[in-house]
Amino acid sequence: MNSFDVPDSTDWSRTALPLFEPLEASLRCEVCKEFYVNPVITTSCSHTFCSICIRRCLSTDGRCPACKTNVSTHQLLPNIAVRDLVKHFEEARPKALDLARREHNADQPNNKRKLDESDIEQNDLGSRTRLRRTRTRIIADGLQRDPIEVPDSEGEDDGAYVPDHLPEGVVRCPICQTPMKEEQVFSHLEDCPSEVSQSAGNGRQTRSTTNNASSRSTQRRQNEPSPTPTRLPQLNYHLLKDVALKKKLQELGIPTWGKSQLLIRRHTEWLHLWNSNCDSENPRPKKQLLQDLENWERTSGGRAASTESKIMQKDFNGQMHASVHKDQFSALIESARKKREAVEQDQTQGEAHSTTGEDSAEQQSELQSKPYEGNNEALATIREKVAAVNRSGSTLASLEAGATSPTTLARTATSSHLNPFGSPSKIVPMFEMPAEPVVDAESSTTFQ
Amino acid sequence: MALSAGTRSNGGSANVAQRLQKELMDIMTHPTPGISAFPVDENMTSWAATIDGPADTPYAGLTFKLSMEFATTYPYTAPTVLFKTPIYHPNVDFSGRICLDILKEKWAATMSVSSVLLSLQSLLGEPNNSSPLNGQAAELWDKDMVEYKRLVIARHKNPEELET
Ligand SMILES: [Zn+2]
Ligand SMILES: [Zn+2]
Ligand SMILES: [Zn+2]
């Protein structure tokens, strides 16, 4: 798997299984857009989120983010069916996506050469025939190995089975039979989805294989027992003096440094981490939760870079950005431009757009409203970029080494004067107490 | 086998960039006409966006540029959104700051770049004139649409005319 492969549901959109996109999207949390982790359902409004996501929302405003119903943390129950669905979907995903992509590519005459060199025989029968032969072949191969049948669109088998000979340097994985370059085989074998592929068209067998796999891993997990932790109660911070709060944090074994606002935020986040772990099928050890808390400390807590100054330095149209980030974005912009040209050619008689500055150096004016459709190059670039950010740990650490232009500073100063809302660019702490009195989710007392 | 959900963690380090990347993928694969959005920095915490003025409003045929800034607390807190194209509108001040409930107290973590831009687009045709930032605009909207429209067009600049 590529290090920059950050899967999301749009992966299905250009495959033979586009309907898997909404399927996968429904297995992802609406808050974090990841597959549900420890999904819980709200008993008051029946919405499902990751335990930690809904707990963070409730700390922020006490409401379900989907429907704004008041929800207390007592009204969250593990959603076991969704948990299992996610687990099995994630297990099935790589193989299914691979098949769906191959089937889709085989349907595209333009991509055919890249995909399957062996099938290119310069014949004079026209692309339609070649296309059908490719399909037939893949179907034939598929029936040999995989429990997926792809009906031919014309519902006939003309028997044009092409013998399996692979291009030079390409071999099949001895286990799952996927063709690949010779040198890739060893690394592939390490995570070859062998069990699923060998089930050879037998649905029941596939299912039992999966069950075996999951029960095995369940057993493994049960061999390392960790006692089910109990949920921690919310504190009424309003009534706690700093000293008492520090003592609480100390008892919990979490850091006690910082001012009282930070102590409160840290304790709140610890409750999110701890209590969502209680909603897990396999709770993680406290040591790992402490690592998560440390990550939080770096990204949003006491060790977070000053987001405010960075955001205020930033200037939407600034040359600073253009120069600092030109390299990272040039590839992306290039693909976007190409795509836009294509789109514009398609739409020559379409409605006139008011923004077409062909010579503008600005990124945005290069981008029409649909520059990315099907732009796999751009998609790949973004994935890579995001992966790099993820690797760097802190989302902000690598951002903008200084480079503040006088103009920007002047603008910043002005805007803070004119600001009618207080300070919109000021970063609100993640779990700042709400301005309105709310019902204390855990203890049903009110705090300010 | 896929990573077990029990060991996968989004705790503590739930990554703003990861969530925004998924939003970007979604915008790219399912573009909404009249709306565009794209990150302008490598961490994806700063985006540029455009909305087209809706038909049958004084903003029809005009395109507006916006900036969006995402804090590390996103999506639990709303992005900071500013109009970069000067706009004459009851709920936008002359620095581009916007008064819109979903960017403040009505924000929800399930909202997204797209939903914000769509809300802003509809705000153009349906201003909230009860709490205007631009009192004159609120008054003209009710009393003199011809003059209102003249001021909208006078104030608008195409994105490529904007200088830094
Ligand atoms: Zn979530
Ligand atoms: Zn709900
Ligand atoms: Zn294999």
Image (spheres, coloured by chain):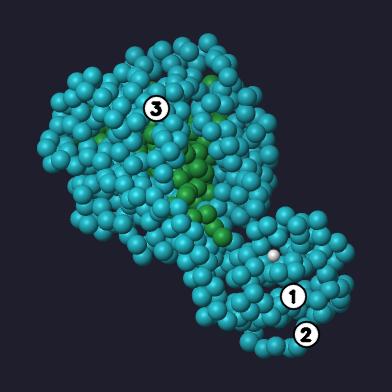
Instruction: Give residue B121's quadrant in the image.
Output: top left
Where A381 falls versus A420 (above or below)?
Answer: below
Q: List x then y, in percent, for residue A78.
A: 31, 57
Residue occupying the point 19% across, 42% down: A442
Tell me the amino acid under the disc marked 2: Ala
Q: Dot 2: what SS?
A: loop
Q: Amino acid at mark 1?
A: Thr
Q: Which residue was labeled with disc 1?
A: A134
Q: Colour of chain A?
A: cyan
The picture places residue A80, in percent across and down from the top left corner, at 34, 62
Q: How far separated are the C-alphas under marks 1 and 2?
A: 9 Å
Rounded to the nearest angstrom, the CA distance separating label 1 from label 3 is: 56 Å
Give me the C-alpha separation between circle 3 and circle 2.
64 Å
Q: Is label 3 within 8 A of ligand 1 (CB to nearest ligand atom)?
A: no
Residue wearing tag 2: A160
Question: Residue at the left extreme?
Answer: A445
Residue B91 or A384: which is nearer the viewer? A384
* Mark 1 surroundings within 10 Å by alpha-carbon count, few (fewer than 14), some (14 through 19), many (20 or more): many
Q: Is residue A56 above or below residue A178?
A: above
Which residue is labeled 3 in the image?
A301
Q: Chain of mark 2?
A: A
Q: Colour of chain B?
A: green
For the point 36% across and 26% down, the residue is A255
Comparing labels 3 and 2, the label whose residue is closer to the camera: 3
Name the N-terminal-most of marks 3 and 2. Answer: 2
